[in-house]
Image (cartoon, helix red, strand yellow):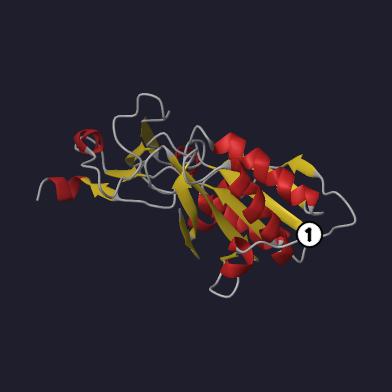
C-alpha cells in the first residue's frame, strides 16, 4: 500500500481492504471542520463498495456526506471548495485491480502535517450521526461560460478510457460548439489500459487522423494527453 499526500493506493482485496477504508476515513473526519464532505469515484469495479464504506465511516463521525457518484477528480476538488472537504475514490492511472482515496481539505490536497493524522489510528467521539444525500455539479455549465463558444465546429475525438470523463468531457465539448467522436466510453471492452500517458493510444491516433484533435483520459480524468492531427503528420 502506498500512503502519500497524493492519496492512499493499493491492490483492492490484497493490501487495501474495506477495514482500511473505515480506518482512514474515520481519521480523516477529524480534519473536516465544516462537518461536510463531498465524495466521488471513478469507474473501477471496487469503487462503489469503497465509496459506501467511506460514506458510512464519515457519517458515523457526524460528517454530512454529499454524493457525486461517478465524476472526474477535478469536479470533486471544485465542489470541495463549497463544502469544506472532499474524498475521491480512485487510484488514478494505476491498473484496474488497484484502488485508493484522495483526501481534500478546502479545495486542496492534504499536506505532510495532515497525512499522519489520516494514517495513524485515532479514537473519535461524535455526538451525532451525519446524513447523506446525492448532489450534482454545475461544472459543465460553469466551464462552458468561461470558455465561450468555439467557431467553425471543430471535430474532436475523446477517448474516455472507460473512466469518469464520460458525461463530462464530451458534453462540455459539445456545449461549446465542437463535433465530438467518443471512444472507449465503457470500461468493459476498452481498447487500452487505464494510463493514457503510457499507452500507445493507437485507436485515438487513427481516428484523430481524420479529425482535428484528440484527447485521452485516465480513469478519474485528471490526466490528459492530447493528440493533434498536425503532429501525427510530422
How many residues crowd mark 1 within 10 Å: few (<14), some (14–19), many (20+)? some
User: Which image quarter: residue 158?
Assistant: top left
Q: Which residue is mark 1?
A: 35
Q: Residue at x 85, y 58 (%)?
A: 126
Q: Position of residue 111 (x, y in %)?
A: 55, 72
Q: Position of residue 193 (x, y in %)?
A: 31, 37
Q: Nearer the viewer, residue 234 or 13?
A: 13
**Which residue lies most toward the bottom here?**
113
97 on left or right of 7: left
User: Which image quarter: residue 211?
Assistant: top left
**Which residue lies most toward the top here?**
189
118 on left or right of 9: right
Q: Is residue 230 above or below residue 167?
A: below
Q: Position of residue 119 (x, y in %)?
A: 59, 62
Res 79 visible? no
Q: Residue at x 19, y 37 (%)?
A: 209
Q: Residue at x 57, y 50 (%)?
A: 88
Q: Residue at x 55, y 38 (%)?
A: 47
> How many numbered markers are drawn?
1
166 on left or right of 58: left
User: Which image quarter: residue 201?
Assistant: top left
Res 84 visible? yes
**Which residue lies most toward the left here?**
234
Q: Secondary structure at mark 1?
A: loop
Q: Nearer the viewer, residue 226 or 86?
A: 86
Q: Nearer the viewer, residue 103 or 200?
A: 103
195 on left or right of 108: left
Amino acid at each position: 500500500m502506498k500512503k502519500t499526500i497524493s492519496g492512499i493506493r493499493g491492490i483492492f482485496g490484497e493490501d487495501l481492504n474495506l477495514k482500511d477504508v473505515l480506518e482512514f476515513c474515520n481519521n480523516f473526519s477529524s480534519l473536516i471542520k465544516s462537518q461536510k464532505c463531498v465524495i466521488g469515484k471513478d469507474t473501477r469495479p471496487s469503487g462503489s463498495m469503497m465509496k459506501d464504506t467511506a460514506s458510512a465511516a464519515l457519517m458515523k463521525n457526524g460528517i454530512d456526506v454529499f454524493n457525486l457518484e461517478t465524476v472526474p477528480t477535478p469536479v470533486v476538488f471544485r465542489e470541495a471548495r463549497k463544502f469544506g472537504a472532499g474524498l475521491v475514490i480512485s487510484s488514478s492511472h494505476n491498473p484496474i485491480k488497484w484502488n485508493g482515496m484522495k483526501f481534500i481539505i478546502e479545495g486542496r490536497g492534504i499536506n505532510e502535517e495532515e497525512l499522519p493524522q489520516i494514517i495513524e489510528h485515532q479514537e473519535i467521539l461524535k455526538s451525532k450521526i451525519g446524513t447523506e444525500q446525492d448532489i450534482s455539479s454545475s461544472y459543465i455549465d460553469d466551464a462552458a461560460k468561461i470558455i465561450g463558444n468555439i467557431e467553425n465546429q471543430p471535430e474532436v475525438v475523446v477517448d474516455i478510457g472507460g473512466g469518469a470523463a464520460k458525461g463530462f468531457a464530451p458534453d462540455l465539448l459539445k456545449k461549446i460548439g465542437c463535433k465530438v467522436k467518443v471512444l472507449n466510453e465503457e470500461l468493459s471492452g476498452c481498447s487500452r489500459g487505464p494510463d493514457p500517458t503510457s499507452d500507445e493510444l493507437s485507436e485515438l491516433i487513427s481516428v484523430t487522423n481524420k479529425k482535428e484533435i484528440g484527447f485521452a483520459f485516465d480513469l478519474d480524468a485528471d490526466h490528459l494527453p492530447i493528440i493533434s492531427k498536425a503532429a501525427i503528420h510530422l
